[in-house]
Image: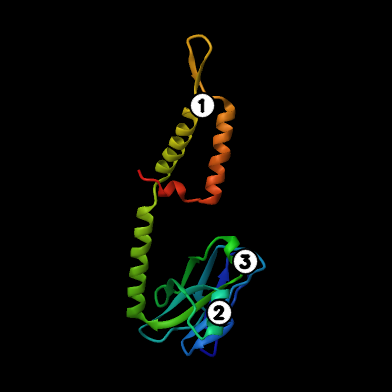
């Protein structure tokens, strides 16, 4: 891979075509910029570039600190498989994390030319993993019900009777206390509502 084969565009950033280093004859490593945050990248084959027959380019993500630590220890970085490009799919967009993740410490993209059969199998495994993950997440309606249930359970202990006919009321202060505690819990564990049993 002596000539550039791939282009990488972090959302809102300039095009990157030169790899930071070559990991092997068929694998290169790109450093993503840290000046501005971004959450998605596009990876594509440069014009007039064709991969060898029966191959595809796999795309991997790792943190710069993990790559540096692996280089010092002689180990292999902990790359996460994002997907692949190749004949018939010369470009793809990938989510690489939240803006804060990309701007702190930096990210590295590894691109490796691998046999098409192996890449196809990896893509099938990735699709199964994504389907399993999305099927386990509660729907928006379920999350809304859990928020309402949480508020009701907290506020019920503050209810009292007021006015003619003894109308049941809850002091506004109780709602403010619930909101403050709820926000604090969401900050400390954003997924706590997803973990609740149905």
Query: Label 2, label 1: how many angstroms apart (C-alpha)?
Result: 54 Å
**In the picture, which quadrant includes the C terminus?**
top left
Question: Where residue 196 is drawn, which disc sits there?
Answer: none
170 to 176, vertically: above or below: above
Query: Label 2, label 3: how many angstroms apart (C-alpha)?
Result: 16 Å
Q: In the image, what residue occupies the spot 46% across and 32% down? A: 152
- Which of labels 2 and 3 is toward the front? 2
Task: Residue at the far front: name it.
Answer: 157
For the residue pair 65 and 126, the one nearer the viewer reads as 65
The crowding category of the residue bearing disc 3, from other C-alpha atoms within 10 Å (few below 14, some 14 to 19, many at least 20), is few
Residue 122: image location, x then y, percent: 36, 73
Query: Label 3, label 1: how many angstroms apart (C-alpha)?
Result: 44 Å
3 or 1: tag closer to the N-terminus: 3
Task: Look at mark 1 in the image and give the residue it sits on.
Answer: 158
Q: Are marks 2 and 3 in contact (CB under 8 Å)?
A: no
Residue 101: image location, x then y, percent: 57, 64
- Which of labels 2 and 1 is toward the front? 1
Q: Mark 2 falls on what kind of element?
A: helix
Residue 38: image location, x then y, percent: 59, 63
2 or 3: tag closer to the N-terminus: 2
* Left or right for 4, reference 50: right
Q: Are marks 2 and 1 in contact (CB under 8 Å)?
A: no
Task: Look at mark 3 in the image and give the residue it sits on.
Answer: 104
For the residue pair 170 and 18, the one nearer the viewer reads as 170
Residue 147: image location, x then y, percent: 46, 39
141 to 70, vertically: above or below: above
The crowding category of the residue bearing disc 1, from other C-alpha atoms within 10 Å (few below 14, some 14 to 19, many at least 20), is some
Task: Look at mark 2 in the image and give the residue it sits on.
Answer: 69
Q: In the image, what residue occupies the spot 35% across and 80% down? A: 116
């Amino acid at each position: 891979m002596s000539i550039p084969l791939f282009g990488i565009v972090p959302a809102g950033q300039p095009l990157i075509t030169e790899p930071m280093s070559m990991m092997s004859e068929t694998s290169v490593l790109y450093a993503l910029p840290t000046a501005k945050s971004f959450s998605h990248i596009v990876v594509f084959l440069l014009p007039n570039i064709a991969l060898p027959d029966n191959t595809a380019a796999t795309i991997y993500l790792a943190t710069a600190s993990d790559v540096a630590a692996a280089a010092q220890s002689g180990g292999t970085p902990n790359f996460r498989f994002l997907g692949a490009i190749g004949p018939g799919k010369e470009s793809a967009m990938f989510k690489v994390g939240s803006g804060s993740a990309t701007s702190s410490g930096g990210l590295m993209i590894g691109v490796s030319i691998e046999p098409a059969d192996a890449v196809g199998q990896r893509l099938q495994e990735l699709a199964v993993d994504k389907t399993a993950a999305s099927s386990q997440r509660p729907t928006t309606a379920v999350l809304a019900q859990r928020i309402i249930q949480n508020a009701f359970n907290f506020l019920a202990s503050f209810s009292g009777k007021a006015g003619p006919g003894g109308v049941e009321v809850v002091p506004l202060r109780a709602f403010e206390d619930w909101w403050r505690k709820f926000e604090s819990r969401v900050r400390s564990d954003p997924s706590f509502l997803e973990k609740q049993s149905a």
